[in-house]
Image (tube, rainbow, N blue to C red):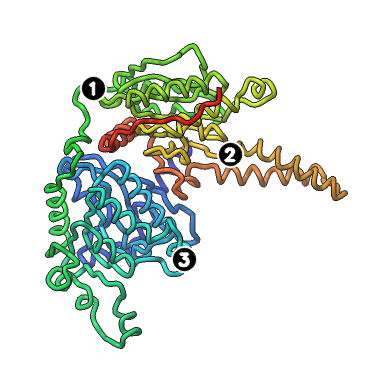
Amino acid sequence: MGWDFFTCRVILEVLAGGGEAAVKRNRSRNKLLPRERIDRLLDPGSSFLELSQLAGHELYDESLPSGGVVTGIGPVHGRLCMFVANDPTVKGGTYYPITVKKHLRAQEIAARCRLPCIYLVDSGGAFLPKQAEVFPDKDNFGRIFFNQAVMSAEGIPQIALVLGSCTAGGAYIPAMADESVMVKGNATIFLAGPPLVKAATGEAVSAEDLGGASLHCKTSGVSDYFAQDELHALALGRNIIKNLHMAGVKREGHKISSEYKEPLYDIKELRTIAPADHKQAFDIRSVIARIVDGSEFDEFKKLYGTTLVTGFAKIFGQPVGIIGNNGILFNESALKGAHFIELCCQRNIPLVFLQNITGFMVGSRSEANGIAKSGAKMVMAVSCAKVPKITIMVGGSFGAGNYAMCGRAYSPDFLFLWPNARISVMGGVQAAGVLSQIEKANKKKQGIQWTPEEEESFKGKVVEAYEREGSSYYSTARLWDDGIIDPADTRKVIGLCISASTNRPSEDTKFGVFRM
């Protein structure tokens, strides 16, 4: 498919960071790139689940690969950790609005799944030209430190490895960490850098004397470990994780059971199962057969509400309840979905939503049969479910169907997209039809004649806007999801997500009032 090439090209651009000159400058200081740093912290041969790799894509006038920060989940000494690594080659590692949003999302996942946080700090702080969008509001830059304090109080370790600059408000990341490491010569921590100190006090001081590793490890006590170089710092980081003891958390909780069967069908076929045109239907069971153990799926209510497929399976030996779309949602489909979610909540089984939904059935018959009431039951069940929820958008995600199938607003633990996914309140053609009727009526009231050519031009602009804004790339650039994944990685991604969720304390699900 065309999107295969496009996605690969965009990812290669992202992996290049801030460009050849910036990378060369970084290496001249004996510094690794953010993904290289993470790789040296991870257990050898282990998987790393990178989150929101295409954040910031075409979001600003200037390029901002990965939003200027790399985040993701992987094991260190057998314990899953959340990594947040500034990319100093991208705008000096400064925080744009999307950088803050991505950092906060990583912390949100870490807090929910009780994952130790490892901050690889190399940042110039807030991006000053956009300070009004970065600094003052509740979910802006300051929330990072609030989250650190709250997670530390909850017994979720906060570890900072300062590998470069750590300026202004960013200085609180290592200062508020449970344990912090600084690298000789490269690492600095200060609330105000030498130019600002000179302007404010008249004092002339070097960056090293003002906030270098020697000062903070020997004198101020801001840092706990003095590293001779970056590799030493990363080794110290691994040792810190090795010595952790987290109450109520299984050390090997992330490990996949050895008792499982591979799917009977080739998982790489998932790359071609979903048509490039989201209007073409495909059987969601063909996806399920390629992601569950042994392709064994015990379908629930198979003959009832057939446009929603529900059932039990295992992924890497871990039980899951799967809910997938096979068409529009009718009354029966919604009731079946609500029933199945209740079962999984009662049995503490994680839920996997496979979204390919155009919405709920409309029309006078559906309204008379209470489609809004039935849909509300499913939305209520999704909203209140306290078991881990993982959503994969494998096709369309339109209108209220997005709500019933655990879209972003329903706090899934993780939400990923296939490259072909589409996300809109409705299709572009439908939106153009609705908006053109409204526009025509307004013009008629004003006594203005609207020619067929003008109407077609109007519709064309609406369709074009919906096509652009409904793409998976538009969504992931704005962090409406946790990233675009290769369809062939779907099974592995779900397995890692479930493993990360096993640290969560189980909660009882309480439902609100269901309108009968």
**Residue at far bottom of view:** 202
Nearest the camera: 6 or 183? Answer: 183
Residue 240 location, x and y as percent?
14, 52
Residue 325 location, x and y as percent?
49, 25
Q: Name the mark nearer the viewer: 1 or 2.
A: 2
**Residue at far front of view:** 513
Kindly tell me whether residue 287 is visible in this rendering: no
Q: Name the mark nearer the viewer: 3 or 1.
A: 3
The mark that comes first in sequence, 1 or 2, is: 1
Which residue was labeled with disc 1?
260
Which residue was labeled with disc 2?
425
Amino acid type indicated by mark 2: Val
Quarter of the image where the C terminus is located? top right
Residue 359's quadrant in the figure?
A: top right
Q: Is residue 431 left or right of residue 209?
A: right
**Residue at 63% across / 20% down in the picture?**
369
Q: Is residue 399 above or below residue 262?
A: below
**Residue at 20% across / 46% down in the picture?**
42
Marks 3 and 1, how far apart at CA: 50 Å
Q: Secondary structure at mark 2?
A: loop
Q: Is residue 114 above or below residue 317?
A: below
**Residue at 47% across / 23% down in the picture?**
337
**Residue at far top of view:** 303
Amino acid type indicated by mark 3: Lys
Amino acid type indicated by mark 1: Tyr
Q: Is residue 90 above or below residue 357?
A: below
Q: Secondary structure at mark 3?
A: helix
